[in-house]
């Protein structure tokens, strides 16, 4: 495709598609969801730690606030998942997401000393639709939803479908609210 000539000192009006790397799409999805988590944690004033080795939990998120009553700093564990098999902006109050039973057992354990949440990112199938940037913003497409699966039963032989609420968008305000509840001795 021919590029339009730039107007005096500007950029071309059409740009050729970039030569994207050959990294597997699933690996790129993992990187994208980590970037989303980092952005949310930064805006919420939280710190992140990645357990090594990973034992089925991707991240530890910690939050300090004067209102916490159980400790000066509280932590939750986060398991990230990303899929393009569920279209962005799912209709209805929930969407179905299937987990391996081993993962569900870890996330559903109760009681716990450190609460866990599942964060599911829904993305368009094509990576070129994952983000857009302009002078004043970087938009990640689309978003993450969160759920606390404590006490959720295993119902399938190898995998279990859980219902993730579409009202629980995982953003900085949601993370602050989660941490405030945990900091007061409650559940996420």
Image (tube, rainbow, N blue to C red):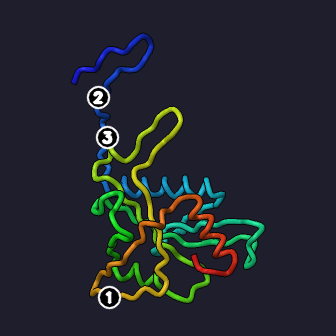
Query: At 45% across and 45% down in the image, what residue appears?
Result: 139
- At mark 3, the secondary structure is loop
The answer to whether one can see residue 54 in this image is no
Residue 53: where, in percent of width, then height? Answer: 50, 70
Task: Tell me, for residue 76, which label it has, or none.
Answer: none
The answer to whether one can see residue 20 in this image is yes
Going by the image, does 59 lie left or right of 24?
right
Going by the image, does 101 lie left or right of 58?
left
Furthest toward the front, the residue is 92
- At mark 1, the secondary structure is loop
Which quarter of the rendering shows the N terminus? top left
Query: At 32% across and 72% down in the image, what residue appears?
Result: 96
**C-beta proximity under 8 Å, tags 2 and 1:** no
Q: Kindly identify which residue carries mark 3.
A: 20
- Dot 2, crowdedness within 10 Å: few (<14), some or many (≥20)? few
Q: Kindly identify which residue carries mark 1.
A: 155
Q: Kindly identify which residue carries mark 2.
A: 16
Q: Is residue 37 above or below residue 16?
A: below
Q: Nearer the viewer, mark 1 or mark 3?
A: 1
């Amino acid at each position: 495709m021919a590029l339009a000539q730039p107007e005096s000192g500007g950029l071309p009006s059409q740009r050729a598609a970039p030569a994207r790397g050959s990294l597997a799409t699933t690996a790129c999805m993992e990187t994208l969801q980590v970037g989303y988590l980092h952005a949310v944690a930064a805006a919420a004033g939280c710190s992140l730690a990645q357990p090594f080795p990973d034992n089925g939990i991707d991240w530890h998120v910690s939050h300090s606030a004067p209102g916490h009553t159980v400790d000066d700093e509280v932590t939750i564990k986060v398991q990230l998942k990303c899929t393009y098999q569920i279209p962005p902006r799912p209709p209805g109050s929930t969407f179905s997401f299937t987990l391996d039973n081993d993962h569900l057992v870890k996330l559903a354990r109760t009681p716990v000393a450190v609460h866990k949440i599942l964060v599911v990112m829904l993305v368009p199938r094509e990576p070129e639709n994952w983000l857009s940037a302009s002078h004043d913003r970087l938009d990640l497409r689309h978003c993450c939803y969160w759920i606390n699966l404590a006490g959720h039963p295993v119902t399938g032989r190898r995998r279990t479908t859980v219902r993730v609420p579409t009202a629980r968008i995982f953003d900085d305000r949601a993370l602050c609210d989660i941490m405030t509840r945990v900091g007061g001795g409650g559940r996420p």
